[in-house]
Image: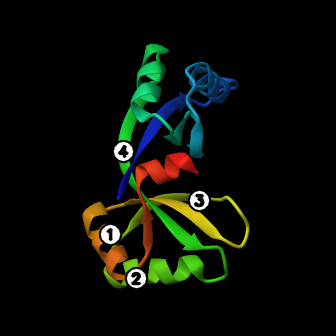
Amino acid sequence: MKVEQISIFLENKSGRLAEVTEVLAKAGINIRALSLADTADFGILRLIVNDTEKAKAVLKENAFTVGKTEVVAIAVPDRPGGLAGMLNALKGEGINVEYMYAFVQKSGENAIIIFRFDDIERAITVLQKAGVRMLKGEEVHAL
């Protein structure tokens, strides 16, 4: 139930994000989800891509600093309270969300939320008990 995510550390300057996307495009890598967080000096670009290993390799070949992390992808009903119920299950077990980002394919269906937890194994167990639908990596890549 885990999904591989790559993180790229970027200097906070014009054009760096475009460089990453160009390298991936030339390698035939499709970005399925992304998040960008920044500080004054650098940013962290988090990506779910259709070929994690290839993306990691081509980015390293182009002098980018890249890491790989396991995250959890969850389908949440796209309606008011869809996210709240799932987060309350985690809250009740004292599980912390380190970060998250989301995307919606079709309004009114499901939102896909990518989570990084402080205790990923325990979070998966709690979410399974709560009946939350978790997606496998290949499901996220196919979206």
Callout 2 amino acid: Ala
Residue under label 4: 69
Left or right: 56 as drawn, with respect to 46? left
Q: How far apart are marks 4 and 1 (CA)?
A: 16 Å
Q: Which amino acid does label 1 sit on?
A: Ala
Write down the residue under mark 1.
123
User: 29 or 69, which is in the foreground?
Assistant: 29
Going from N to C along the chain, the mark reached first, 3 or 1, is: 3
Q: Earlier in the sequence, mark 4 or mark 2?
A: 4
Residue 114, position in %: x, y? 49, 58
Mark 3 highlights which residue? 102
Sequence order check, earlier mark of 1 and 2: 2
Q: Is mark 2 on a helix, strand or loop?
A: helix
Indicate which disc, 3 or 2, sits on the residue closer to the N terminus.
2
Q: In which quarter of the image is residue 131?
A: bottom left
137 up-or-down from 106: above or below: above
Look at the numbered disc 1 and give the secondary structure of its residue: helix
Give the amino acid type for the residue marked by disc 4 in the picture: Thr
